[in-house]
Amino acid sequence: MSSPYTKVYANKRHVRHQGISIYRPFVYGSVAKPFDPSNRPTTINAEHTHQWSVFVRGIDGEDISYWLRKVQFKLHETYPNSLRTVESPPFEVTETGWGEFEVQIKMYFVPEAAEKPQTIWHFLRLHPWDGDVEGKKLRRETVGSQSYEEILFNEPTETLYDIMTSGPPVVGRGKSKGKGAPKKGERTAELPANDTPDNPFSQRAEGAEIDRLREAKKTVEKMIADERATLAERESIMAELNKK
Ligand code: SLL
């Protein structure tokens, strides 16, 4: 008679695709809006100056619950029940408060991934910090702060691999052609072709960023070449002086 462990071991779930990694982009961040003092909700704590939300979401509103199962947001300890668990999308917590702090975001994956949870940190910004700071405060503008990230599953289980590469097509995605391009009906890591006011993360924006980095590299290379030339000139002057 085979032991029960043989069964678990032979389960497809635990067979990993060796040498393969699969990644998916996502966004985490926050938005915060100051209360209008003349029009405050009366139920809100008098010390609270802002309403804010902290979130983990797909690019351009993509539903990422096919790989992300739940998210725990650990708020500052001044909050009651500071550990907030969100078990389904939107993975988001909305609160009111008076201060900025670091939010701990713990991401739990679908059981098919057979992966440990991963923790990231986000600094919750309430106050404008760049550009026309005073004007933004005066106009009580919404303050947003978000980061692009990629989750990487190394040697995914076969079941996770199947989940990651099947399922409903992502609207606006999968336009690229050629080998490796997502087929209709496949989930994909591909970014949308163009950004929108709501979503700054696109292939176009990525291309522009790469161009910017290339230009910056050229500038730095030119600076290094100029410095080398100056150095060589100085060395030859020194050599001349030493001869005398
Ligand atoms: C600060 N180090 O001093 C930070 C802490 C904490 C913010 C900010 C809680 C509100 C409540 C709140 O806004 N905490 O007490 O319900 O700026």
Image (cartoon, rainbow, N blue to C red):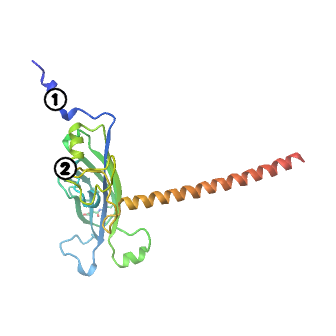
Q: Position of residue 197 (x, y in %)?
A: 32, 69
Query: Where residue 167 is drawn, which disc sits there?
Result: 2
* Mark positioned earlier in the residue sequence (1 or 2): 1
> Would residue 202 appear left or right of 130 to someone viewing this image?
left
* Along the line of sight, the residue nearer the viewer: 122 or 50: 122
Quadrant containing the N terminus is top left
Residue type of the residue flagged with mark 2 = Gly
Q: Which residue is mark 1?
A: 8
Farthest-out residue, left: 1
Q: How many marks?
A: 2
Callout 1: 10 Å neighbours few (<14), some, many (20+)?
few
Seen at 77% across and 52% down, the residue is: 234
Residue type of the residue flagged with mark 1 = Val
Farthest-out residue, front: 178
Q: Position of residue 232 (x, y in %)?
A: 74, 50
Q: Is mark 2 within 8 Å of ligand 1?
A: no
Callout 2: 10 Å neighbours few (<14), some, many (20+)?
some
Label 2's element? loop
Distance between the alpha carbons at the discs numbered 1 and 2: 26 Å
Q: Position of residue 191 (x, y in %)?
A: 32, 56
Ligand 1 placement by image quarter: bottom left
Seen at 19% across and 56% down, the residue is: 89
Relative to 80, say whether 51 is above or below.
below
* Along the line of sight, the residue nearer the viewer: 84 or 153: 153
> Would residue 127 appear left or right of 172 to someone viewing this image?
right
